[in-house]
Amino acid sequence: MPDIVVALKNITKRFPGVTANNAINFELHGGEIHTLLGENGAGKTTLMNILDGIYRPDGGEIYIDGKRADIHNPADAMAKGIGMIHQHFMLVDTLTVLENVVLGLKSQKLYVNKKAVAGKIRTISDRYSLGIDPYTRIWQLSVGEQQRVEIIKTLFKGARILILDEPTAVLTPQEVRTSFDIYRQMIHEGKSIIFISHKLNEVMEISDRITVLRHGEVIGTVKRAETSKGELANMMVGREILFRLKRKPLKRKKKILRAENVRALDDKGLPALNGVTFDVYGGEIFGLAGVSGNGQKILSQVITGLRKVTSGNIFIEDINVTNASAKKITGQGTNYVPPDRLKVGLVPNLSTMDNAILRRYNRPPISNNYFINYREAAEYTEALIKKYDIKVPRKEAPVKLLSGGNMQKLILAREISENPKLLVVVHPTRGLDVGATELIRKELLKERDNGVAVLLISEDLDEIFMISDRIGVIYEGQILGIVNIEDAEIKRIGLLMAGLKDKSTA
Amino acid sequence: MVIGALFGFIAGNITQSPYLGFLVGMLAGGAASMIHAFISITLRGNQIVSGLALTIFGLGITNFFGQDWINKKFTIPVNPVPVPGLSNIPFIGPILFNQDFFVYFSYVLVLLMWFILFKTKTGIHLRAVGENARAADAMGVGVNATRYFWTFFGGLLAGAGGAYLTLVYAPFWLDGITAGRGWIAVALVIFAMWNPLYAIIGAFIFGGIDSLQFQLQAAGTTIPSSLLNMQPYLLTLLVVIAATIIVRTRHIGTPGELGVPYAREEK
């Protein structure tokens, strides 16, 4: 029997409208790397935030070394030897590594004995081959090195159980190599690690055991040696019943969007799209599935003119719009429902009316080239509100006061009203309640029936299956496969999402 | 600063003690800074607007309470105390070590602040709270308490500057006697890139230019005095422009969250 250092029993956590964790059981053995695997929103981070004391569970118990533990905050967790490395680093850029370590220490007196602290940092750094100099300033370090500083911070305070929340998401492939060596070294030195991830390749490489979460529930715990990527993919996405919304038969019209071997870089200047080629036709919904971070966001940005491509071409109805301005692309008939409602879709502090006219404030009848005709603007807004049943306190109130569903309806209404040829829709129902979700999906189907080409980018496979006519799967910046909905099997899509092109379950 | 200047001056005259006057001037500055702290930390208002409003308020309130004190003098002289030995060093001896108590106090203060800022846990907390409040909060540092404390401390120092002006340097009260010296102090902080050791060097340069205009006028120069009077302010402008360029290209100087209010629940 291995010693069980952490046991979570029946942990339940509810947020308004969702149960993030439902009676979860989880065990961490001493000296193992145990992965929590699941799609975005499966409840992995929530569960770990509970163990770290950031959230309090609504039900269930935590046992550390077999003893019942009551963890109220991260300091409690730390006192029990648990340290969590978050996705967003908690580091002060302009301070040195040493100063960042001292920042979290209760034990230090007023005067900081820098020599002693530096010595201890060096010892930790050498033991785990972290290669961190205590006197370097944080801004001079790469992201991978900064992560190692976070590890030093927790080890310095005596952590023996480390929670790593998607540590590889921000790393380059080379840095991932190094960090895996470091994790193994930590295990070798007697630490235990909980590793959160949704990347199957990495999970299969580093884990001893894997627990799969889906919709806040444990699907199962398996040993790495006894499982395969295919099985894990199925556990992650596998669903029993898939219902489809009723719809008219597909009436495919002419080609609207063509992407040809498109390549683009992400914000960090790393390749995010590695030769994407696909077409979307009028009258169809093309669903783009994929595990998050495989280039979906970048793709939506290059198509809508918010990001430059490095090579390749994008056509709208045979007009080359590669690297054209967003305004020109919109003029060609592309409209966009962005993934981030409040940051990209709306101007939060402007009123519902101001947001509603954002696409047409500069042309008649709302504008006469010099002034805005507020009567026209108000009438137009009223019409949108009525037609799409948007619940608005007052149309003069800041739009940020609307509920998520009503914000999304407003954006969709605004974009659809431009009579687009191509509608690019990203995560249209994320975080919405059931009613709003269904309404949005029905609107998308209506647009399809009207002959609009709809590109639906979503991480919600249910949604993709429910309304798409064709499904493409993006993996590491490439479209791995495109299937018609009639031939689409969820297993096959799951495998493609995991980066497995053929049917073998490697 | 102007609040410290007036109330220090009044207290000095009433108690007939420059030292008590100085203390009251500091406390008056500290009290005024709490208005700024409440607006910008608790209410999370815009610090620039709050700061500007506070200076206008300072000029106004001192104009009101200073009516009866205009052109009165503070008559108790604060005499220089030569430091034995050091004051005999040729050239710099008389400059640096034949001064009054308050000047020596400023030397000690600079060294002390440098030590606190860069050698103690308190200093790390102070800098962390100004650079990345969220990280500091996550590490268990009380962000608002730290910000309040150091804003108060800054107010004390500004008050001290004002009190020195009316009790020792001038020593009399005039409406708006500080004449924008507080702004020069702001430029000085930028010039010094938030390091007290550089700040004192900068202070000597600014002070030197300030007194140069009197020296030149006394020497009977033909340069119009209005041009000479302009010098410290011109220098201030140049320093701010230069510092902005330097800060943009290098990761030094301006704290990352200068003027940024902190709210825990916001993303």
Image: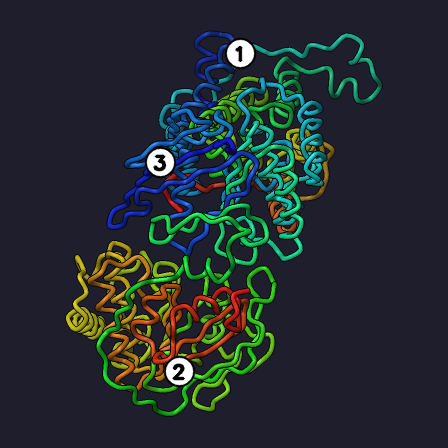
Q: Which residue is mark 3?
A: A9
In this rendering, does residue B117 appear at all?
yes
Please tell me which residue is depicted at 29% across the width and 72% down the height of the picture.
A466
Q: Which callout, 2 or 3, points to the residue nearer the camera? A: 3
Residue density around tag 1, few if under 14, some if 14–19, many if 20 or more, within 10 Å: many
Q: Quadrant of the C terminus of chain A?
A: bottom right
Residue density around tag 2, few if under 14, some if 14–19, many if 20 or more, within 10 Å: few
Disc 1 marks a residue whose amino acid type is: Pro
Residue A491, quarter of the rendered image: bottom left
The reply to the same-chain question for discs 1 and 3 is no
Disc 2 marks a residue whose amino acid type is: Gly
Residue at mark 1 to residue at mark 3: CA–CA distance: 70 Å
Q: Left of A9 or right of it: where is A228?
A: right
- Chain assignment, label 3: A
Q: Which residue is mark 1?
A: B18
Please tell me which residue is depicted at 55% across the width and 61% down the height of the picture.
A267
- Chain assignment, label 2: A
In this rendering, does residue B129 appear at all?
no
Q: Indicate which disc residue A242 carries.
A: none
Q: Secondary structure at mark 3?
A: strand
State the residue in front, A357 or A269: A269
Q: Indicate which disc residue A331 carries.
A: 2
Q: Left of B257 or right of it: where is B117?
A: right
